[in-house]
Every structure is written in C-alpha cells, then in structure tokens.
Image: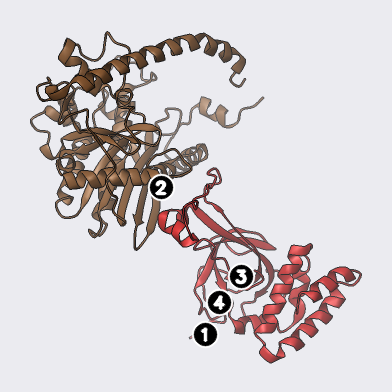
Amino acid sequence: MTQSLFLVVAPHVGEVVESATESLLAQAYAIDDAPRLGSLVRIPFGRASDGAAGCTYGVVTRAHTAPVDPGRAPVARGQSATSLDEIYREHPQLERLFRTLFAVRVVGHGAVDGAIVHYLPEKPPEVHQLVFACDNHELERFTERPGYLALLLADRGPIADEVTAAFLREAARVRGAAGQAYLVQAGKAMVSLLRGDSVRLATLLGRLG
Amino acid sequence: MPLDFSQLASQIEAYVPRFTRDADATATEAARLRDLLAALGDGWRTAPEDRAAFMGDPALAYPTPACPSSYRVFATDGSQIAVDRHQVATCYVINVGTVMIQYGAHPDAQLGSVAHLLPDHDVETSEDDNGDPEAPSPSRQTSLELERAAAELSTLRELVEASPPDLFTLALIDNSLVLWSQTMNAEKAIDHEIVQRYVADLAALAGLARTRPFAIAGYLSNPSSPWVADLLRNPQSGNHNGAAHPVVYDRDVFDRLNDGERTERFKRNAAMLKLADYPSECWVDFCYLRAGGEIARVEIPRWVSGDPELLALTHAAILDQCRRNQGNPAYPVALMEAHEQAVVSDSDRRGFWWLLTDRLEATGVAGNVSAKSRTKRTPWT
C-alpha cells in the first residue's frame, strides 16, 4: 500500500476560485476566516487530496471580504448594537451575503516523488481545488532551503515585503530556539537576492525582529 | 439608437397636469371614504358583502404585538427565463429563491435557489387554430405566472416540512394566497392542474400548522386592491368597483395607520374561494398594516386569522422583519433576500440558452435558433 507523501491532517481552509501559474485566488468557507497573512498553504493536484499527484505551495498575500453580489452595497447595521456579535445575531443572513477571498502567491511545489522544489509547477492548480493550511512540520520542511525567497521577493512594494517578513517570522517561530539562526541564514540569502536595493533589504530585515 | 430622453421629457411634461389632477381627485375621494369609515359605526355588521366582507369594526387599529425573541422565517420568491420562440426549444425556467432565517438563541440563515426547467404549456393547451402563433400569448404568460406562484408555494412547503417544529415559524410569499388570474374564469381555474397543486400545498401547510406553531402570509407591497373602498361605498350607493369615482385604493383609505398598526381583518370573496369544492382551510382573509412609510396588504388563511395568538405572532413577526431591514425600505428582510436569490441576470439567461443549445446540438436534435437571435448575439456594424 502506498503511503501518502503529503499527509492530509488539517481540514481545508478554502477552495480555489481563480487559478494562474504564479498566483491563485481562494474562497474561505466562512467570512473573515482566511488563513493568516504570510502563512504557507498547500493545494493538491488531481482529484484526490492525498498529494499523490503532487501539490502546489503558496503563501497567503492578501485577504478581503466583500458582498457576494457586488451590486448590493452593504449598509451599516450597528447603530443600536453594542457588539459585532449582536449585529450578527440580529441579522444572521449577513454571514451568507459576504464572502472572504484570499490571494496566494505560488512559491514552489511538491513533486510526485515527494521532493519539495522552489520553482513554479508545470500547471496551475485546478479551479475548486481544496486549499490546506500547512502545519509546523510541513512549513519547516518547505523552508529548509531559502530557494522560495526568489519567488516571494519577485513581488515588489511595501505590502509584498510585509508578506515576506510575516512568512519568515513564522518559519523562524516553528524552529524554536533555532529560529534566530534561521533568520540570519534567510537574511544572508536576501542580501544576495536584493543586491543593489539596500533600502528594501534594510526595511525587510527590520521587520524580522 | 438608445432611448432618446429628450423626446420623452416633453411628453412627461404634458402628463404632469393629468397626474396632478388624478392625485388631487384621489386624495379628495380617499378623505370622503375615511369619513364614511368613521361614521360607519355598527353598520359593518349589516353591510352587504362584495369582493370583500367586513369581519369586524373596520375603524379599529391594532398596535404591534410583542415579537418573540426566537422565531424562524421562511420566504420564497420566483423569477423566470420566459419562453423565447427564437431559441432552440420552447421551454422556460422558473428559479425560486429560498430563505430561512432563524433568530434568537441559535441564529442561523440558509439562502439558496431551486431551478425548474419546464415545457411550454401553451404549445400543449392551445385551443385556437386561427390565432397567429407568433403573436404574444396571454395564456402562455398566465401559465408562466401561475406556475411560478405554484413553485414558490410548493418550495415553501418543502422547506417548512423539513424544518424542526421547535420555534414559531412564519412562511412568507410576496403574492396573494389566492392563485387566480383575473384573465381566468373561476370555474375553469379551479380545475386547472397548477391551481389544484397550489391549493393542495396550501391545504398541506394548514395541516402542518396543527402540529407546530406555524403561520403563512402573503405580503403585498403597495397593493392596488380597492375592495374595502368599494365596501364603504356600497352601503350608500350600491355602486360597485368605484366606476363613477376617482381611483382610490384601500391603502389610501388606511393611510392614517400609525407605524406598526394593522387594520381589522376582512374576508376575501374571490369567486374561486366561493366554489363548493374549494377547501375551506384555504379560505383567505386580509388586513392592511403600516410598515414604515408604506401600507401593505397581508393575506392570511382563515386558520391564521381566526386564531388571535397566531394572528398576533404573524403581525409581530412581519413587522420585526421590516424593522430588521434597516437601511432599506421597510419590507420583510426574508422576502427581500428571497428575491435576490431568485434573480436571473441577463448573463444567466444567455448562459442557459447556450447550454441548452449546445446540449441539443451535441445529441443531434435539430434545434433551430432563429436568424434574429443570431444577429443579436453578433450585432455587426
């Protein structure tokens, strides 16, 4: 019996609704319930979710919540309420009228043989493919080598750098005492990748603490 | 060319004096009828019946009762993709928007829609060989409207039947509870297969109400019923339908209701309801209530209107629904959401015809999309 290469233990956190080679958009299953900014997610290939056909890895770069029907403008509901909970109790349908989407930057993929590589997969994930949050072990495994940084740093601008910094902080956190050494190693890799852009490098390094 | 508003602007100006005149005449007549209402006293007990009948003192107004903190509301509303003879097949689609909202200790909501593809009744029931088959067909339109109303009610019945009987449950539609088109003869209509299905569903819902705290109501915004106005004229003149009077709707007569108040109940005397084989549990009464800036007509079956507790719950829950729709006109929020769920966009409509055409062509059925329809898809310049 073949053992799954990418063991599925956590429930899925969303579903792909738009897919491209370098990025994808996924819908969360409850409003305001997107994965954290900078977190690592895995999207299997194929009809099964066991990873036997490989998977795509991505980093959450953005989340937003908006009406399901863009033609219906939301109106304020809480003038006489004392909390958000009270607003939802008074208007239970609101949870069905909005949806939360999150954007994912593809930063690598898992090959059929189980190896993790830090370059784009041959094909984007299928639409409606399930999106899984990676656990600490998988995050640690994905970030063993800093090759993912090239794809992550390809996005420019302050928000993109916030995402990179959040991802690195999490990668350090899961390593416990070895986390600081990991950040030093990642910093060195960025020095090489951001040669000629010292301002950006300094900003990024400043966000790793 | 798009619509030329400059052409319409001058025509609108020409209409304004007429509209103003009509509005003034309506206001004067409504004031006269309100005076008649105030002076009616016990006269309602002996007033002759008309298309409606008094069930109590029509001058009374009932304030909003207390609404339970926990209750459940269901609503359905339908829309359609009408028959289009330019398309590959003559059929139509009814899309019923469905809503369940639960308030109280365990708030919840379920929104959805149920689509039905139906064959064109008009093809099967056409009785006149001499008519132009391309001409607009009132019977086709009537069938579609009846089928839509029946689908709304049957879906509502399924939703209520599948729900637990723990909370007071109100089921709402935005139509009359009497499924009877003005173009249909009552004796023929009662035998109409769609009407029979509708009546069976209404009777089944009456049966459900014997096992759980449940009520159903039809909520009609901006109603154009003149039945009470006619009743008020009747004792004086024996005059029917306001033929010699300016048009006054009942909503004009009752526009002094305070927010949340409802009128006394009135009995509907639609010809169909008087037929011997129309089930008595489906008899319908109605009242008017003020929700925000509008007087609405609320239709309720006799088993609701005859039960003071159920009637009060219905009155309270409808107003609670309107209150919760803050930021929007006072209209039951469940009905508004059901409408939104039912909406079929132009894009959906095109998608449906494309899917049907594609499927029929793939199976070798010789469908024929008209040249006119094809030019609409690719409007060359």
- Disc 4 versus disc 3: nearer the observer: 3
Please tell me if label 1 and label 4 are on a single chain: yes
Of all residues, the one furthest to the bottom in this rendering is A177
Q: What element carries label 4?
A: loop
Specify the color scheme.
by chain
**Residue designated by label 2:** B324
**Residue designated by label 1:** A3
Tell me the kind of residue under disc 1: Gln
Crowding around mark 2 (Cα neighbors within 10 Å: few <14, some 14 to 19, many 20+) is: some
Please tell me if label 1 and label 3 are on a single chain: yes
Marks 1 and 3 in Cβ contact (< 8 Å): no
Determine the image quadrant of residue B80: top left
**Residue designated by label 3:** A36
Disc 4 and disc 2: Cα gap in Å?
Answer: 50 Å
Identify the chain drawn in red: A
Disc 2 and disc 1: Cα gap in Å?
Answer: 54 Å
Question: Is residue B94 in sight in this rendering?
Answer: no
Residue A18: horizontal and vertical position, in percent?
60, 57
Marks 4 and 2 in Cβ contact (< 8 Å): no
Residue at horizontal 48%, vertical 31%? B369
Identify the chain drawn in brown: B
- Disc 4 versus disc 2: nearer the observer: 2
**Closer-to-camera residue (A92/A23):** A92
Q: Which of marks 1 and 4 is nearer the N terminus?
A: 1
Crowding around mark 1 (Cα neighbors within 10 Å: few <14, some 14 to 19, many 20+) is: few
Tell me the kind of residue under disc 4: Ala
Q: Is residue A13 left or right of residue B250?
A: right
Disc 3 and disc 2: Cα gap in Å?
Answer: 33 Å
Question: Image height check: is A84 above or below B61?
Answer: below
Q: Earlier in the sequence, mark 4 or mark 3?
A: 3
- Disc 1 versus disc 3: nearer the observer: 3
Q: Which numbered disc covers residue A52?
A: 4
